[in-house]
């Protein structure tokens, strides 16, 4: 079943996700400068139709972009974020993820957070571990 997937960020990770998903899904791409590939002129319009949003951006703009798109996300939209480092306000990925978890609690938006940090993972409602190619649920 083809899904509408919005990749946010068109650097190395965004290109990798595009390569992995393009043959099986309707892939749209947004980068800091605007819509790279899609049907709409704005990020908000692209987000409104996405079934999944992949944050393939440095942590720097995560908070601002997540806040910007939150009102436009479909209730059942899945968001996946891979981030590290600090944003421009000095917030860590953990602090940005906390805001995403608050969006989950307040709006029901689902986020998949990929991390090596057990402290971040401990805040999630559900934890899946990938070890030696096998996915295990805690």
Image: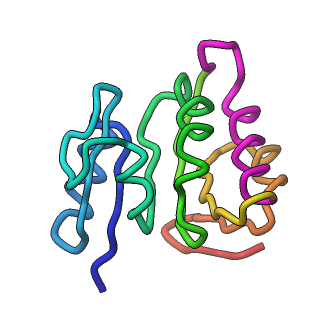
What residue is rendered at 80% in x and 66% in y?
125
Q: Quadrant of the N terminus?
A: bottom left
* Magenta extent: 86-105
The image shows residue 28 at horizontal and vertical percentages of 26, 54
The image shows residue 81 at horizontal and vertical percentages of 54, 47
Report the side of 87 relative to 6 (left or right). right
Q: Quadrant of the C terminus?
A: bottom right
Main secondary structure of the magenta stretch = helix
Residue extending farthest bottom: 1
Q: Does the magenta-highlighted stretch encompass residue 90?
A: yes
What residue is rendered at 53% in x and 35% in y?
65
In this view, 109 is above or below 9? below
The image shows residue 118 at horizontal and vertical percentages of 78, 48
Report the side of 20 relative to 136 (left or right). left
What residue is rendered at 35% in x and 27% in y?
32
Q: Nearer the viewer, residue 55 or 40?
A: 40
Report the side of 49 relative to 109 (left or right). left
Q: Does the magenta-highlighted stretch encompass residue 100?
A: yes
What residue is rendered at 25% in x and 71% in y?
25
- Residue 50: image quadrant is bottom left
How many marks the image carries: the answer is 0
* Type of colouring: rainbow
Q: Nearer the viewer, residue 15 or 106?
A: 106
The image shows residue 90 at horizontal and vertical percentages of 69, 14
């Amino acid at each position: 079943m083809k899904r509408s997937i919005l990749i946010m960020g068109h650097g190395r990770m965004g290109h990798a996700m595009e390569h992995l998903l393009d043959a099986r899904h309707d892939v749209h791409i947004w980068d800091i400068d605007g819509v790279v590939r899609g049907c709409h002129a704005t990020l908000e319009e692209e987000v409104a139709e996405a079934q999944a949003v992949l944050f393939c951006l440095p942590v720097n703009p995560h908070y601002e972009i997540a806040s910007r798109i939150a009102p436009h996300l479909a209730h059942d939209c899945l968001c996946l974020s891979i981030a590290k480092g600090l944003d421009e306000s000095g917030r860590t990925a953990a602090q940005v993820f906390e805001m995403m978890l608050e969006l989950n609690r307040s709006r029901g938006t689902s986020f998949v957070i990929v991390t090596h940090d057990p402290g971040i993972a401990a805040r999630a409602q559900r934890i899946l571990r990938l070890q030696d190619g096998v996915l295990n649920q805690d």
